[in-house]
Amino acid sequence: MASDWDKVLAGGALDSQSEEIANDRIRGQALLAQLNGSSAGDAPLRQQICRELFGHCPDSCWISTPFTCEFGRNIHIGEKTFFNFNITILDVGEVHIGSHVLLAPNVQIYTATHTMNYLERRNWTAYNKPVRIGDDCWIGGGAIICPGVTIGPRSIIGAGAVVTRDIPADSVAVGNPARVIRTLKQDEERCWELAQ
């Protein structure tokens, strides 16, 4: 039998009355409070909390605090990814963030969405559209990533951009709504030198 989360992640409505979902929200918020209250110098404790909070978060990642999310369980992070201060992720749906990703301060990532029908919104009915950010991306300060967006590997999102649609790999996107203004040509020899 499918769990309440299975139904939500398959595109169904989030049932705020679900005991499973309510317990996961309480658990996530308790872990979040521990993370935000922990010392930046206590890396082992912070890594342990992150392993419990997120769906996947390797010890090579760094999550600066304050950090905000709803559940944590639906956030999956790759190796050596860096979250700067005041990142907010609404993880009603899954958020997959690749390896070597840089999130600047005040980045917001949303998977939660609502119906256009105001009567249904009165019940706080929420749906989700997953977000995916590829490896080696750089998301500028204050950028907003909207539900359902995929950002291709190695792309750069300018500060303050509002990303409402997919961004191809190796792109620079800026503005509101964000649009691609440049395609990056990766200099493999130079990239190799920088990696040394």
Image (tube, rainbow, N blue to C red):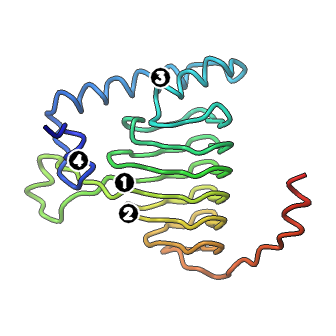
Mark found first going from the N terminus, 2 or 4: 4
Q: As shown in the figure, which amino acid type bears the numbered disc 3?
A: Ala
Q: At x 60% / y 19%, what residue is drawn? A: 38
Q: At x 30% / y 28%, what residue is drawn? A: 24
Mark found first going from the N terminus, 2 or 3: 3
Q: Quadrant of residue 55?
A: top left
Mark found first going from the N terminus, 2 or 1: 1
Q: Gap in Å between the C-alphas at discs 3 and 1?
A: 22 Å
Percent across and percent down for residue 31 are 45, 23
**Which numbered dot is residue 148?**
2
Q: As shown in the figure, which amino acid type bears the numbered disc 4?
A: Val
Q: Is residue 20 left or right of residue 81?
A: left
Percent across and percent down for residue 9 are 27, 49
Q: Quadrant of residue 183?
A: bottom right
Eye-nearest disc, 4 or 1: 4
Say what secondary structure mark 1 lies in: loop
Q: Is residue 3 left or right of residue 65?
A: left
Q: Which residue is mark 4?
A: 8
**Which numbered dot is residue 33?**
3
Q: Determine contact: label 2, label 1, CB under 8 Å.
A: yes
> Crowding near pointer 3: few (<14 within 10 Å), some, many (20+)?
some
Q: Gap in Å between the C-alphas at discs 2 and 3?
A: 28 Å
Q: Is residue 139 above or below residue 172?
A: above
Q: Which residue is mark 1?
A: 111
> Crowding near pointer 1: few (<14 within 10 Å), some, many (20+)?
many
Tally of numbered tags: 4
